[in-house]
Amino acid sequence: MPHTFSRNDPSHNLRKQMMTRRNTISMFGNRLTQTIRQLGSLSRVGIALLGIGFAAHGFHAEEVHAEERASGSDAASETESNADPNAALLVADSIAKDLRYLTSEKLAGRSAVGPEILKAAEYIADRYREMGLETRLYGDSPMQPVEMATGSQPTSAEDNGLRWWTPGEEPAEIQLDDQFMPLAIGSTQGDVEADIVWVGYGIQAPDLGYDDYAAVKESQSVKSADGEGSVEGKIVMMLRKEPGFADPESPFDGVKNTRHAFFDTKISTAIDQGAVGVLFVNDPASIELGLKAVDNQYAAEDRRLNALLAQRNALPAEATNLRSSLTEKIDQVQEMLGNRERERDRASWGLLGVAEAGTRPRKGDEKITDPHTGKSTRRPAIPVASISREAADRLLKQMASISAADDDEGSNSDSEDSRTIFAKGLAAVEAAIDSDYKPRAIDSPGLRGRLKVGLTNATATSPNVIGVLEGKGKLADETVVIGAHYDHVGMGGIGSLAPGTVEVHNGADDNASGTATMLAVANRVVSELSDQSDHRRIVFIAFTGEERGLLGSKYYCSQPRFPMSKTVTMLNMDMVGRLRDNELTVYGTGTSDGFESLIQGLNSDMEQSSRPFKLNLVSTGYGPSDHASFYEAGVPVLFFFTGLHSDYHRPSDDFEKLNLDGMTRITDIVSQAANRVATMEQRPSYTQTNKDFQIRRQLSVVLGIRLDPETNSVAAVMDPSAAKQGGIQVGDQLIKAGDRTIRSANDLREELRPKSPGDSLRLTIQRDGNEMDLDVRLRAR
């Protein structure tokens, strides 16, 4: 029989007893200021936090009803009278201390595949030990190692490279990282020796009047048995992209790539023509962009180095600890600058990265389905590599020499014009094709090459960090998991929404906030369950690899430390550091029959110690965070979340923007939920929910009006504001915003939620009996 979370349940009585002695967790006015002063960050953190608190009740927030503002003030007063300020300060200080470490520069953004993740893991493990949690779970360690793929990497210099020669000539050679790079879109292992043939852009598009392979066949003096020349059994060298890339008059698109420019299309065409290897040559525009990106990264790191050096030089002699910390950062930046210099060399050669053309290695024959024609064929895997423009230039000039020699013998069909163009090298051939959209081919029999590629799967290992509070009594054999991921996106790259930026992404909200709150919950739960005779085992897990696809939580669910069949609930905290407008979203309230009433009841009970949240309850147990791994394994879940914002996965997600008061209040509700689930007599039932989910975004724009809750008319207009500029007047009746009918301030709020500053919104109003449309340009809050 499903558990209904009755208030007569022993777990509810336990919670009521705890409420009389627990650490209440609310900070207002001078108490918040005092906490921030103790943390040494009044000037920035205090302003940010007080600003968030006041915004919830401010005139500019048109989505807040008048009576809600009044009740909010009463709640604040009640909190002032009932809260234990010393307990609140201790909780806030603990959370802030953990946040400061987890968001520090020394952790370099906590990439799951970087060495710094181990420092974060050790810190979390030490915090578990301080609380008295059991950490001897994997030998003497709390670390559950998780191996994750990081792509492909070359095996060795001996396995990778290109040599070419003509009879009687000394071979030329380019090597790994020196004008040669194997590409993961091709076979993982390959060693072929064959003639090298130039195939222009490697495009076969007769419907557009362009066919490189037809031109190659026409130019060849040695024909196949059916009288046609071919590239069968040969290594083909081709340009990236397509002719006239930036020309709107191109027979191709000219503005954006067509399918003929795709690496996959070019490789598939080459394989269809019988090629045994592919050499790609980068285009000048892509090289210029690559160099600019590297130069920008280098300049940013150089500025950072100079700033760090200036800080260190300004330190007094006795500041030895800070000097040591700055020296460590300086060493890291200098190492990065050295890496950028090597990257610039590769970029100047025009070499593609191993995974830049794609990351789908072909191992043996595989079935290929053309998405445009639906035709399926089986194609062999062939080695694919990127070579420098300098090497390609040498090869084309050598082809011209071979063609000229053959012409002296009377066996060459190439025109004098064709040989002249190829003798000038790569840039001339490229320009000729782009000028008239006619393929350029040359016959160069006897130019042999040996192409070698060797790639292996690259992996990294980082740990889930687990601490356990053992159960007691008749419930001891069952488990409640409380988790948060502690990894982020490191210095940018994979996962970053600041493309091209090489900068520490501290991930304060995502998800240092969840990790620090989980640690605060652990401390609270250990204390509150200490004298209970019956409660379930509580397993606290800091997950790795969430940013790479929930890898840590998926691994734990497949290799659990305690049986999944005995795991009754999972509570997840991800991005809980930006409470705004007092809105807390809880996903998973439909994953067990009593979860919705449980959360609503706990929230209502918060009136006795702090202001209740404005809850947004979402039924589904699916979604892009670690709770989904447990839900798919049959475990009911609850996921606490304060919303997406514009700093998500960007370097600007910093400590100073976090709402510590909100995090302490979230600590309270999560702790109480954990206590209830840990002590209830019956385990929560599992309920299937809809797989559809939508991640809730924080409101980031303001219209600048206040609606009368009785009449839904405009009661006030801010000046200046988007509404004022758009012509909204007091007394206007708001009928629609966009396509949404507005019946309440909440309707307007939900219409504004997905909008960004600068977006235009059409408002339909009624004024003096006449209906009209007004367009407003939304402003940032």
Image (cartoon, helix red, strand yellow):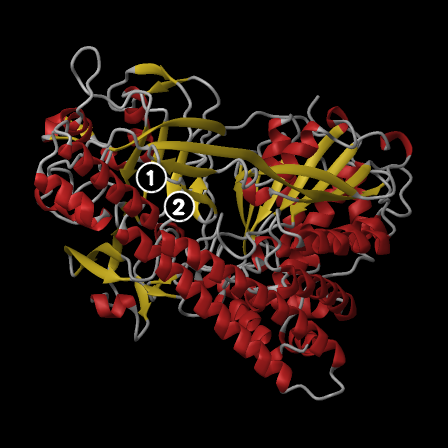
Circle 2: element type: loop
What is the spatial separation of the Cα atoms under label 1 and label 2, in whole angstroms? 9 Å
| Residue 654 horizontal/vertical position (percent) | 55, 64
| Residue 21 horizontal/vertical position (percent) | 83, 58
Image quadrant where one finds the N terminus: top right
Residue 745 in sight:
no
| Residue 7 horizontal/vertical position (percent) | 73, 39
Image quadrant where one finds the C terminus: bottom left
Which residue is at 20% across, 31% downward? 443
Residue 121 in sight:
yes
In the rendered structure, the answer to whether residue 558 lies left or right of residue 442 reads right
The answer to whether marks 1 and 2 mark residues whose Cβ atoms lie closer than 8 Å is yes
Which residue is at 28% across, 37% downward? 238
Question: Which of the pair 279/120 is nearer the observer?
Answer: 279
Tag 1 residue? 280
| Residue 140 horizontal/vertical position (percent) | 87, 43
Q: Which mark is residue 654?
A: none
Which residue is at 33% across, 14% downward? 377
Residue type at tag 1: Phe
Question: Which of the pair 67/182 is nearer the observer?
Answer: 182
Tag 2 residue? 352
Question: Which of the pair 502/120 is nearer the observer?
Answer: 502
Circle 1: element type: strand
